[in-house]
Amino acid sequence: MADDRRDLAWLRQALQTAISLEHATMPLYLAAMFSLRVQSFTAYNFVRSVVMEEMIHMAIACNMLAAIGGRPQIATLHHGFPSQGLPGGVEPDLRARLARLSPAQLEVFMRIEVPDFLLSPEHQDESYPTIGDLYDAIGLAIDENADDVRQAMRETAANPDRANQVGDNIGFTTIVYQEGTDPVPLLRAGISEILEQGEGSRSRTLHTGPTSQNEESHYCKFAELHYGRAFQSPESDIALTRETESQFFEGYPIPFPGTVNTMAVPADGYAALLAHDANADAARRALDTFDTRYSQMMKSLDAVWNGPAAKSWPTLGEAVGLMTGLRVPACFGVMVAQIPADAIARLPELYPDEYADIAALTDLDQPVFYGPRFLNLNV
């Protein structure tokens, strides 16, 4: 995102970018979660909790945008994987691809959620080297345009055609202008919640504040799976740094979970591979069924903020139900479709530019299965 004029228009654009960014993480995490052979236990609970909080963060960004007169655009969001970086120019070094849960994919997830104080020096000169840097820029724009923000919120509150404010008891609230009360702290509180849950509190820890019951940050949860050990502060008085990080993950063991060996999704959504699969029709039906239901979820989420206000709450329930329900077409449709060994043998020929990435995220010496593509058919 351009930084030259951070006015109210920039702020609205930045919040829409934040919505796109939060959404972009969800297919990555869901693809890994669905690959778990047992949809329970520690790894599943960690990843699922992160997915739910990413949805909360997207909802907070939607409420913030709606509060200052914008309309969240969700139905047609489609980041497109594999990708270089995240929406808005965030983490441009990141190479992200839909894949099963693996040590290599956990490193990608940790890069996504990394806090500034654990960021590798080689990335520190990027415009937005972390998600937190984008939200810091948004927070600064709110402060610098505080009077315009207050006026926009006042006008929005008086506009009957405004986008909806959506509240829930799963961790996010509405942001509503009230005469006589400064609304700017409400926007700031939304940013703080997103940053603490995703990256840990600003006190250089990997846990949130008391508002979120001091739970592990997203980075911490992924790091526990990566190190195979629970977080535990060392007995010695040492600071948490990139060099000492591993010493903070020497708690009880967390064995790595079994996964379905799904093939990392290529840029063409398996099109070249399907052309060499004798059972392509069945695999294609399963893939299309998943994409259709995923697209329905995106439409429902859009209607939560942009549909009739009286139907906002039940529509949110429908959208959450659709997201939860994606597990069935993923685990019992797409991921039971095995890719023929002769087609796997042709991967270097079919995907010469992507083969190295695919091989790093897929065990090509074992039976390989399709994975969900998360194609948004509304686009």
Image (tube, rainbow, N blue to C red):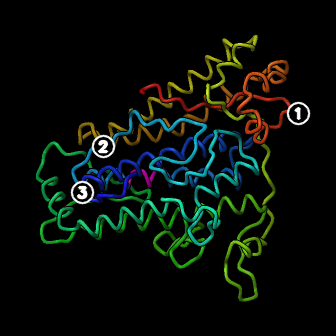
Position of residue 219 relative to residue 95, above or below, is: below
The numbered mark, 1 or 2, whose residue comes first in the sequence reads 2
Position of residue 259 relative to residue 349, above or below, is: below
Q: Measuring from the top left, give residue 342's x and y in whole percent.
A: 84, 18
Tag 2: amino acid: Trp
Tag 3: amino acid: Leu
* Horizontal side, residue 124 vs residue 301: left or right: right
Q: Are marks 2 and 3 in contact (CB under 8 Å)?
A: no
Q: Find the distance from the CA under tag 1 to the CA under tag 2.
A: 46 Å
Position of residue 40 relative to residue 220, above or below, is: above
> Residue at image x 78%, y 22%?
349
Tag 1: amino acid: Asp
From the image, tell me which residue sits under label 2. 305
Q: Viewer-nearest of labels 1 and 2?
A: 1
Q: Tag 3, which secondary structure? A: helix
Crowding at label 1, few (<14), some or many (≥20) Cα neighbours within 10 Å? Answer: few
Q: Viewer-nearest of labels 3 and 1?
A: 3
Which range is magenta?
55-60
Crowding at label 3, few (<14), some or many (≥20) Cα neighbours within 10 Å? Answer: some
Q: Residue furthest bottom?
A: 237
Magenta stretch secondary structure, dominant: helix
Residue 97 quadrant: top right
Q: Which mark is residue 8?
A: 3
Q: Find the distance from the CA under tag 2 to the CA under tag 3.
A: 20 Å
From the image, tell me which residue sits under label 1. 365
